[in-house]
Image (cartoon, rainbow, N blue to C red):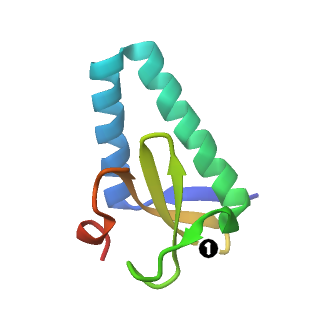
Amino acid sequence: MARFELSRLALTDLHAIADYTLERWGREQGLAYIEALQGRLTELAHQPLLGRTRDELAQDVLCFAFESHVVFYLGTDFGISVVRILHKRQAPSRHID
């Protein structure tokens, strides 16, 4: 079964997104956003080629936009490994090695 795993930085990103969303938009909307994001990560684990290649950032990195964020990930034997989850206004070249 395909699955996703989060890097340490991606987990930190997810926590920051959750904290901000809960504070800004409230519990119900915050939880709905995180749940929808996790659902999208599961979809990407099943279909990793949905993303766009971003080899200029790092070899084999793909990205997929989700609402206000962009998921950067690598395809793996088990699904995907999420490298970062950045706000769409952030410059990925400053956050992905």
Q: Residue at x 45, y 53 (%)?
A: 70
Quadrant where the C terminus sits is bottom left
Please say if 97 is above or below 25: below
Q: Residue at x 36, y 14 (%)?
A: 26
Please say if 88 is above or below 7: above
Q: Residue at x 40, y 15 (%)?
A: 27
Quadrant where the N terminus sits is bottom right
Front position in the image: 13 or 65: 65
Helix, strand, or loop for circle 1? loop
- Extreme residue toward the front, this view: 89
Quadrant of res 3? bottom right
* 83 displayed left or right of 37: left
Q: Picture coordinates of residue 55 (x, y %)?
A: 47, 82
Question: In the rendered structure, which amino acid carries the disc numbered 1?
Answer: Thr
**Circle 1 residues within 10 Å: few <14, some 14–19, many ≥20:** some
Quadrant of res 93? bottom left
* 30 displayed left or right of 45: left
| Number of marks drawn | 1
Q: Residue at x 42, y 41 (%)?
A: 68
- Extreme residue toward the bottom, this view: 59
- Extreme residue toward the right, this view: 1
Q: Picture coordinates of residue 74 (x, y %)?
A: 53, 71
Front position in the image: 47 or 69: 69
Q: Read off the residue under disc 1.
A: 76
* 47 displayed left or right of 40: right
Q: Picture coordinates of residue 10 (x, y %)?
A: 38, 55
Q: Picture coordinates of residue 49 (x, y %)?
A: 68, 68
